[in-house]
Amino acid sequence: MKQILFATLTAVTALSGAAYATPGNGHNNGKGWGVGHVPPGHQKKMHRYYYAPGDRLPEGYMVIRDYDRYGLQYPGDGYRYVRYDNEVYRVMRDTATVAAAIGIVSDLLNN
């Protein structure tokens, strides 16, 4: 019994050591980026944030006045459409609090 246990532990240890010793055997494909480093072109995709109803948009949004261009209807009294970070939101006019996330700008313009 001790021999079987010893043989099993030896095999597991040998296999796990081989996996760590093989260069390029991981998510970074041998590029050496390591934990916490992001390949070029992936940074923007990972940190994209969508605002939900009730969230307040930060400064820097653009008010949309030409609803037809985006295929939008009148937003309603007290509301307006804004464009922020390539997204279109319907927000409360006075507080910039999100009432609804409408969609991605490119998708709305292609309709």
Image (cartoon, rainbow, N blue to C red):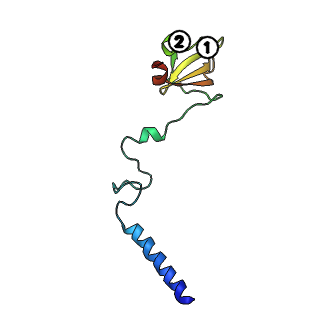
Residue hosting label 1: 75
Could you tell whether 21 is left or right of 75 in the image? left
Q: Amino acid at mark 1?
A: Pro
In the rendered structure, which amino acid carries the disc numbered 2? Tyr
Residue at mark 2: 67
The picture places residue 9, in percent across and down from the top left corner, at 51, 80
Q: Residues within 10 Å of mark 2 (few under 14, many from 20)?
A: few
Residue 79: percent from left, percent from top: 63, 15
- Distance in Å between CA atoms under marks 2 and 1: 9 Å
Q: Position of residue 45 (x, y in %)?
A: 45, 39
Q: Secondary structure at mark 1?
A: loop
Question: In which quadrant will I find the N terminus?
Answer: bottom right
Residue 34 lies, with reference to residue 100, above or below; the image says: below
Q: Give the mark nearer the N terminus: 2 vs 1.
A: 2
Looking at this view, name the residue that lies furthest to the bottom: 2
Q: Secondary structure at mark 2?
A: helix
Q: Is residue 107 above or below residue 43?
A: above
**Among the 4 quarters of the image, the one containing residue 100:** top right
The residue that appears at 58% across and 31% down in the rendered structure is 51
* Residue at x-position 48% and y-position 75%: 12
Residue 22 higher or lower than 97, as above or below: below
Residue 65 shows in the view: no
Residues at marks 2 and 1 touching, judged by CB atoms closer than 8 Å: yes
